[in-house]
Image (cartoon, rainbow, N blue to C red):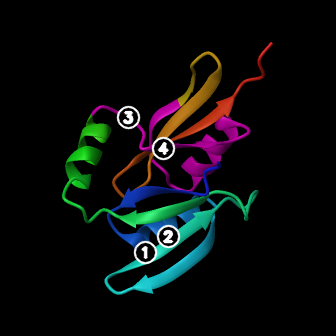
């Protein structure tokens, strides 16, 4: 068994598509109109045939309270792996991304957390080499 799709709930799918592709650097995989919403997935440029991230409309009534609680508590909705958190932080800050937690050493990893402009906090994680 393997993970082929995961999702992040977003307020506006088109805004999310722009942010996740133009700002974060993911590639569009699918954009299939389904009426009011669309099936929009993005993938890592490093793994175009890897796990897809669905930009899921945040239309379900349970989504709003759930995401508000996560943001209020500073809990990221999901996490993306990076090779160098400091470098990625600098790259994203230069693109106007607002970080709510700067690069922070947490023992086995370095993390940072940013606002995805679509209702979520997202963590980037650099795993440290283990002795």
Which element is circle 1 on?
helix
- Does the magenta segment cover residue 85? yes
Which element is circle 4 on?
strand
Question: In the rendered image of this protein, does residue 77 appear above or below residue 111?
Answer: below
Which element is circle 3 on?
loop
Question: Residue 10 falls in which quadrant of the image?
Answer: bottom left
Query: How far apart, in angstroms, are the residues tagged by discs 4 and 1?
Result: 20 Å
**Residue annotated with mark 1:** 14
Which of the pair 72/35 is nearer the observer? Answer: 35
Query: How far apart, in angstroms, are the residues tagged by discs 2 and 3?
Result: 22 Å
Q: Going from the N terminus, do you reach mark 4 or mark 1 first? A: 1
Query: How far apart, in angstroms, are the residues tagged by discs 1 and 2?
Result: 5 Å
**Residue annotated with mark 3:** 75
Query: How far apart, in angstroms, are the residues tagged by discs 2 and 4?
Result: 16 Å
Residue 57: percent from left, percent from top:
35, 67
Which element is circle 2 on?
helix
**Is there CB contact under 8 Å for labels 1 and 2?**
yes
**Is there CB contact under 8 Å for labels 3 and 1?**
no
Q: Residues within 10 Å of mark 2 (few under 14, many from 20)?
A: many
**Is there CB contact under 8 Å for labels 2 and 4?**
no
In which quadrant of the rendered image does the C terminus lie? top right
Q: Which mark is residue 17?
A: 2
Q: Which residues are magenta?
A: 73-102
**Residue annotated with mark 4:** 78
Q: Going from the N terminus, do you reach mark 2 or mark 3 first? A: 2
């Amino acid at each position: 068994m393997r993970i082929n799709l995961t999702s992040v709930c977003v307020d506006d799918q088109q805004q999310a598509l722009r942010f996740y592709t133009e700002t974060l650097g993911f590639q569009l995989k699918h954009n299939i109109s389904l009426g009011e919403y669309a099936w929009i997935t993005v993938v890592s440029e490093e793994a175009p045939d890897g796990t897809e991230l669905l930009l899921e409309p945040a239309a379900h009534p349970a989504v709003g309270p759930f995401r508000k609680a996560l943001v209020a508590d500073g809990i990221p909705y999901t996490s993306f792996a990076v090779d160098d958190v400091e470098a990625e932080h600098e790259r994203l800050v230069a693109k106007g991304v607002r970080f709510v937690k700067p690069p922070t050493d947490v023992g086995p990893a370095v993390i940072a957390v940013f606002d995805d402009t679509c209702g979520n906090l997202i963590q980037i994680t650099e795993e440290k080499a283990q002795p």
